[in-house]
Image: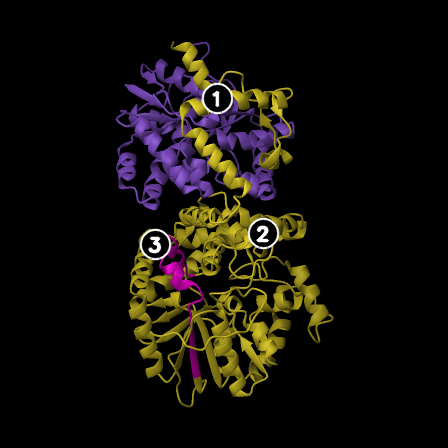
Chain colours: A yellow, B purple
Amino acid sequence: MTASSRRTTESSAGTRPGGGPVPLPTPKFASAARSALADTGLRRNLRGATAEARARTSAATAEAADWDALREAGRAIGDATLLNLDVHLEELERGVTGAGGVVHWAVDAAEAREVVTGLVRASGAKEVVKASSATLREIGLDAALARAGVTAYETAIADLVVGVGGDEPSHLLSPALHRDRAEIAELFRRTLPAAADLGDDPAGLAAAARAHLRDRLLRARVAVTGANFLVAETGTPVVLESEGNARMCLSLPDTLITVAGIDKVVPAWADLEVFLQLLPRAAGAGPMTPYAASWPGVTPGDGPRAFHLVLVDNGRTRALADEVGRAALRCVRCSACVNVCPVYERTGGRAYGPVYPGPIGAILTPQLRGVESAADASLPYASTLCGACADVCPVKIDIPGVLVHLRGAVVESRRRRPVPTPELALMRGLAWTMGDARRYETALRRSTRWARLLSRGGRIRRLPGLLGKWTEARDLPAPPAESFRAWWARRRP
Amino acid sequence: MRVALSVACFDDALFPDTGKAVTALLERLGHEVEYPPGQTCCGQVHWTTGYHREAAALARAYAALFEGAAAVVAPSASCAAAVRDSYPRLARAARDPALARAAEGLAVYELTEFLVDVLGVTDVGAYFPHRVTYHPSCQAARVLGVGDRPLRLLRAVRGLDLVELPAAGECCGFGGAFAMKNSDVSVAMVADKVRHVRDTGADVVCAVDNSCLAHIGGALSRLRGGVRTMHLAEILAATGPA
């Protein structure tokens, strides 16, 4: 396996030296979250949608008698696969090639964009249809195609809603989760041809979207899709979906281009069996997804005449080298962690950047992109470490553990700066104080006196400096004059 | 039994009544309480905020201080979780097998684990005639897995009217540095927690971790919520007419 020697010099907003970017979460999490928190309609939609998803997941997992054994199997298969990823990827390449497909290796997003754009350009097509894939967003495909004069059309209804609304997806499986029915109806009436009289009943909305999308699907000559899994033993990509749009993308056009991260490999069909049970239940989609399509290469006279599989690294090898962080590569993108996250429920997905939302985004994005920028560095801190995500993860990713590990990476990168951050100075000072009981006791006496001066009526209403964030909306009790240790010393002389 | 008391730095300074209550409670149950001198901080804040080198130094000192104690009781779920769950991780991160061994040798119990599992008591002879609800803090419920131990202890308290907290399992939004770094989200979370607490009509909300209680209590105090926060230990230590 060798990465292509072609290196692009194409630059875009998020490009940094040394690797292709995931499209950027530009502001820090806290700033992005602030505007989301103030959007009452968004808050209501998120509250409703996540509560419903949680209930569905909980029901679907409760009825699988062997759920814990399945999760453990998913974890074990994921770990074993990652430890022999090179072997499985080469087997996958042989399978795809043997079935008449072509495998392309892309070391980063820029290279993946270049491969796909080149293939589309060579086909002569001016438009392509896409089936929902976070990986396509990750590599920033739409903008690259647009620069090449090619229009890309999403074919899933939720992606259509996001597209006509001109905003970013807020969820991996339900990109338009932040929208309610009335908003969607309004968007369709404004933007879809022949939808000016549309009401807001779900069947009518679906019919309008279907009529609109069907036309694009029927005339498309090139499709670009993602894949949920890549079965190495036969070289077969697999996609799970609920609308049938991906199946149409897989079967109608002449050229099919599938873009997938190298972490999507499962060694054998017997392994896939485990994930086909885990993913839909964890996602709250029930015991199975309505459609599970697989396409080994090309079949003469049936479906696409050319099949290309673009395997994307884009930071995954770096994550794989991290013995704690690599657990994130087991992710099957079910979004169970997203749906239970109390932070996500209040901020929505866009605060996490445009690609991977919620707890999985908070551990995946900083690993794919690094933690040098303030926005990337803020993601591992976008969690209270409450652990609700780890409880529901179908492949048992210890998300809080990885978050803390990545916080360590953020701090290490800050230590390399010539001037220490205020937080680093504070935390070092605190550790120095705590490193010795006498120093601690002196500091305790001093800060108690100081805090009591700040207090009124037994509570502190305003704290200075970094602690001022606490008292923006919360009081702090005034420390009693006598600490526990002082009491103990007095009691037991 | 001889018990080594581990008092969180946070509790030492802000909530000394919790340590006093644990002392009173364990002595009432006939045990000897020691407060090993020289304790400072378990290193939890440094660990969870990413300052792993500093956390490792504090963890080594903590492990040395409590080494050999038959039972270390911490009335702070997050400190107990730090020692039990984080120290092994911290030792791996710091490539310090000696710390890993020392951590493994520590017999650290969160208070309700110690009462129910080690001492085998649920009725500690407490009397507390108030309406009380219990917030299961995330570290207690998810990391330590204390389950219904706190509730079993509360149910055995005479005079106490225990009311269920709606959406009890949802985090209060404290999360250590999260409360400052993401204060807006943190406040949005505690607003919902406070709403649920007030919906119970309880006079007192209790937990086994004062950091969550400082967060919930801080919001209740700012809003003049009319609900007191109390560590579970203080309820269990309370006695009254026989």
The image quadrant that residue A456 belongs to is: top right
x 32%, y 66%: residue:
A85
Say which amino acid is labelled 1.
Thr
Q: Chain of mark 3?
A: A
Q: Nearer the viewer, mark 3 or mark 1?
A: 1
Mark closest to the chain's N terminus, 3 or 2: 2
Disc 1 to disc 2, C-alpha distance: 37 Å
Note whether B215 is above or below A75 in the view shown.
Answer: above
Q: Nearer the viewer, residue A440 or B23?
A: A440
Is disc 2 on the same chain as disc 1? Answer: yes
Instruction: Characterize the local packing of mark 3: few (<14), some (14-19) or many (20 or more) Cα atoms within 10 angstroms.
Output: few
Quarter-of-image position of residue A466: top right
At label 2, counting other C-alpha atoms closer than 10 Å, the crowd grade (few under 14, some 14-19, many 20 or more) is some
Instruction: Find the magenta span and give its range.
Output: A307-332
A119 relative position to A190: left or right:
left
What type is the residue that disc 2 sits on? Lys
User: Which chain does the numbered disc 2 sit on?
Assistant: A
